[in-house]
Each structure stands twice: as structure tokens, then as C-alpha cells.
Image: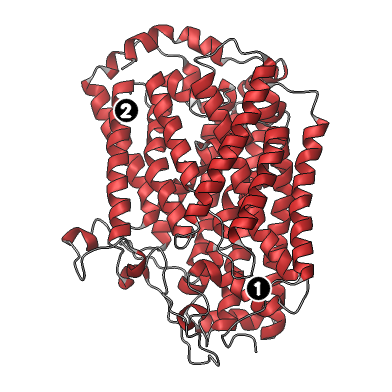
Amino acid sequence: MVGTGGPVATFSVWDYVVFAVTILGAAGIGLFQAIRGRKESSSAEFLLGGRQMTAVPVAMSLTASFMSGITVIGTPAEAYQFGAAFWIFGISYTIMSTITAEIFVPLFYRLAITSAYEYLELRFSRPIRLIGTSMYIIQTVTLSKPTKEITGLDLWGVLVATGLVCILYCSLGGLKAVIWTDVFQMGIMLAGFVAVIARGAVIRGGLGQIWEDAGQGGRLNAFDFDPNPLKRHTFWSIVIGGSIMWVSIYSINQSQVQRYISCKTLGHAKMSLYVNMVGLWVTVSLAVFSGLTMYSIYKNCDPLSNGDVTASDQLLPYLVMDILGDFPGIPGLFVAAAYSGTLSTVSSSINALVAVTVEDFIFPVWKNLTQKQISWLNMGLSIFFGGVCIGMAGVASMMGGVLQAALSIFGMISGPLLGLYLLGMLFRTSNSIGGLVGMVIGLVLTLWVGIGGQVYPPTADMTNPLPLTTAGCNNTMTQNYTTTSPWSTSASLTTPSNFRPDLADSWYSLSYVYLSLLGMLVTMVCGLLISAITGGCKQKKMNPDLFVRRSDLMCFRCTNKSEATDDKEKSLTDHHMGVHITADLDVKNTELEKSTKL
């Protein structure tokens, strides 16, 4: 009987067929794009799609590449255990999309950069650019994580197979192949959520019953206005801290920047982020409601406490095999949805890692490479980084839950980097010494707090897990199990028994969504102070293209149509004629760089 515990079905032949067809379909789309563009083999075509992409496919790719891996598995489990507070991130997505579209996109698009970290050299110095690129590479490789499965599929087998598919279309088709494959995978992911919700509604007697069960179980009490920064999820922590966290992910992360600067006009680039915002709303809503559906079915028999699964990452796959196992092919669709998330994340990572490696490390050293050599270099690096991501994903599969762990790593690294970019974009007095010292201080501080929070996780009164029971279970597994998650004490690193330092219940208990905000503020404040001490106020006049303009903002463009029109025409001319204005910026900033390099 559904929802009473015990073993569930495993994959049938039809599930394998559906799964294989889905993965091969993704590979087919990527290969089609590779064959279609085989005559256009330039580096710009491979890394940026020739800067001719349109808003809608780029928007769907933006949504798929970063929401997939942490949403398909992590968010339903989050809603099941902690309630629907994650829904409030919809507000954060709105703030993030607006800030990224109105501040970062115009500046990056105006500079016509390929690597987001080119800006750091133009504004500060080459050493800072290389440090920023290295931080991105470390962050991206360590976040390559697959889903744990209980469907009977061999994890390493599927991981290698999907990884090889990624490598194939990434190395041959470049960004165009990645984007159009993401569009297909996004549809598969949404279909997986819909299948879970629809079947759950049939079992429970309608969506209204699911909503009622969630309310009775306390899962709908999402709006906690407690300003305490130590509480894991409150309205303020999600809206304020969550917004900055997602800005750091979307505005300066190469995987995202590379997509929206591939658009053929600035208007398309901005629109891609606003369409992506709607995509994020839909995705997180379906993911959270899938978690509420899971609670409605398992409200009297928690699979985690009952020992049916060993980690929160396995809750949704277990639910799928429990309620959809009698429908041949449907579990295969869900697993395809989960691994489509893995595919889109890994493929975007591969393409972005190739871009920053080529632009930031290779081109500045070897400037006379032929177009053929560059093409082979791009393909070779795609294969190399694909292999690295597969290996790291296999290691990461042995870890705990995906959601908070992934977002914590983003916060610890991206927060200080975001502070560095804002320091350069908003303050003309900041210099390379101030920027570097500020970022280092911010990074050390966030790593200290973030790692401390993993070693000494916050107590239950700060994380607020909601009650679950096994009173209705008919079958109890006899295996040894632990109910582990990144925020539970058992998931922490080994520490002396019952020992918790004073900082554990204060500093280390800071909500993970505030890590980006902490890193950003510390970097900016320290950077400004150090810059003032080291002569930042005495710098010579700098290129105005390196700073945020009032005309970049939509509100000012609407009130000053002539300036907006001129700016748009200039942007279109630059891109359609293939003008790479960073060369001009290098010339204009030569004198500045000599005076500010470390």
C-alpha cells in the first residue's frame, strides 16, 4: 500500500527505454546544432553562439543550468521537512533578475567580454582577474554533484553515460548546443514534477486535500518575520540574504554571464533574465508543491525515519517508485528529469570552464594561435573538464543533501567576488590593492563562518524542522540508517562528543543565506578603506565604460529616449560588426593599469 513504508518497485524495461530515449534525445539536439554550425568554427561561435542567440531559449537555459541540479531533488525534500518557506525565494528571484538585468548586463554587454573575469583586469589588475577565475573554477568543479538513486540504476554507470553525452555535444557544438539542449531538458524536468503532483492528487483525492494536509502539518506557515539572523529561513533572511545570494550566482558567474552576453541585442539579453525570472517562479512552485504532495502521502510514515531511505536526497526518487512504479515508463521519465538536471548543470559548467580557461589563462600567453588550433583547444578542454566533473560528481555522491550544501558553497565564494565587482563598478576611488585585500578578508571570513557551521551545525530551534512520524508504517526496514542532512548534527564533521564552543550557537549558526551578504559587505567596506589609505582618491581619470551608467537603468532609459536610442544603436553596431571593444579599453587603460598593478 502506498505511503506505509517498506521496499518499492525498481526500474522496468520500459523505464530504461524512456530514460535512454530522453538522454539520447538531448545528445541528438546537441549534435544537430554541432552539424548545423560546422562551417562556423570560430572561438566566438563556439563559446558565445556567435552572439546571435534570442531571449527565450537563453532564458530557459539560464533556468535549467542553475535551478536543475539543486531543485529537482533538493527543494521537494526541503518542503517536505521544513515547509513551504522556500516559496518566498520567488521574491528573491524577482530582485535578483532586476539587479542583474539593469546593472550587470548593460556593463558586460557594452564591454563585449567573453569571460566575466575580463572586467577585473580592465578595472583592477591581471592578478586579480586570475584569482577571480581560479575561485570560479574551484567553485564549479566542487559543485558537480549527481543525485542519489534508489531505482536500481547503477550510479557510476549512469553518471559516466550522461557525462559522456555532455562531453560529446559540448565539445562539438559549443554554447549553441548547450542552450538548445537545456531547452529540451527544462521541459523534461517540468514534466517530471507534473507527473508526481498529478499522481499524488489522484491518490489523495485532489489538490485541495494535499493543500489541507500540508496546512494541518504546519507546512504552510511560511512567513516568519523574526529578524534573528541565526534562524535558517525567515522572511527577512530569504528576501534580503537570498536576493544577494542569487545576485552573486546570476550576475558574475561565468555559466550565466556567458549565456546572456550571447544574445544578439542588449534588449534580448535583458529580456532573457526577465523571462528566466518567470521560469524560476514556475520551477520552484512545482518543486515545492511536489514536496507538499510527498508530505500528504507520507504524513503518517516518514521514509527517512522508517529507514526506507538513508538521506533526504532519496526522498523524491523513493516517492516516484512508490506511487508511479505501476506505470511503465513514468519512473523513467522522472529519473530522466533528475539526470536532465545533472546534464544541464554539467554541460553549462563545461562550456563556461572552457571559456574562462581560454580567455583568462591561454590567450594572454599564446596570442598567435590559429583558428584551427583554437578549435582543437576548445574541444580538448571540453573533454578534460567533462572528465573532471564526472570524477568530482562521483566523489560528491557520497556526501549528504544537495540543496543547502550547494548554496552554502556559492555563498562562501561568490559573496566576496560580488563585493569586488560592485566595488569596481560603483566606486571610482577603489583601486587594485583595496579590491584584493577586501576580497581576501571577505573570503576568509565567509569560509570561517561557513565551515564552522558545517562542523558545529545550528541547533533544531534555529533550523525549525517540522514533526514527522512513523506511526502509520506497516513495514519497518531493519537496516541501519541515519536521518542525515546538511543542517543536522549527525551530518557534521567529526567533533569531540558533546563539545560545542561558544561561537557554535552564535557566529557559526548564521543562516547560510546570509553568507553572500556577509562576504559582499566585508569586501566592499574593507576594500574602500584600504583604497583610501593606498591612494585610491588620487587615481587618474578612468574609462567611464567600466562603471554603471544612469542610462543603463530602464527607468532612466524611459525618461531619456534619445540617450537610450543612441546607446542601443552603438551596442547593435558593436556586435553586428564584430567589434571587440576590450582591445580599445586595454589601450585606454594602459596608464591606469601601470599605476595600480600590484
Q: Name the side, left or right, on which 301 lies relative to 275.
A: left
Examine the rendered structure and indicate whether residue 426 appears above or below residue 272.
above
Examine the rendered structure and indicate whether residue 206 appears above or below residue 390.
below
Residue 513: x %, y % from top left: 40, 54
Please give the name of the residue rendered at 42% of the width and 41% of the height, measured from the top-left corner.
Answer: 414
The residues tagged by marks 1 and 2 sit, at their Cα atoms, a distance apart of 48 Å
Task: Compare residues 559 and 212 and report the one nearer the observer.
Answer: 212
**Element at badge 1?**
helix
Examine the rendered structure and indicate whether residue 502 appears above or below residue 518.
below
Q: Answer whether residue 58 is visible to the viewer in this image.
A: yes
Examine the rendered structure and indicate whether residue 300 appears above or below residue 141.
below
Please give the name of the residue rendered at 29% of the width and 59% of the height, measured from the top-left corner.
Answer: 455
Disc 2: which residue: 436
Q: Answer whether residue 555 is visible to the viewer in this image.
A: no
Q: Amino acid at mark 1?
A: Val
Please give the name of the residue rendered at 56% of the width and 37% of the height, measured from the top-left corner.
Answer: 385
Name the image colouring. secondary structure
Residue 391: x %, y % from top left: 53, 47
Residue 154: x %, y % from top left: 62, 63
1 or 2: tag closer to the N-terminus: 1
How packed mark 2 is, by other alpha carbons closer than 10 Å (few <14, some 14-19, many 20 or more), is many
For the C terminus, which image quadrant?
top left
Disc 1: which residue: 320
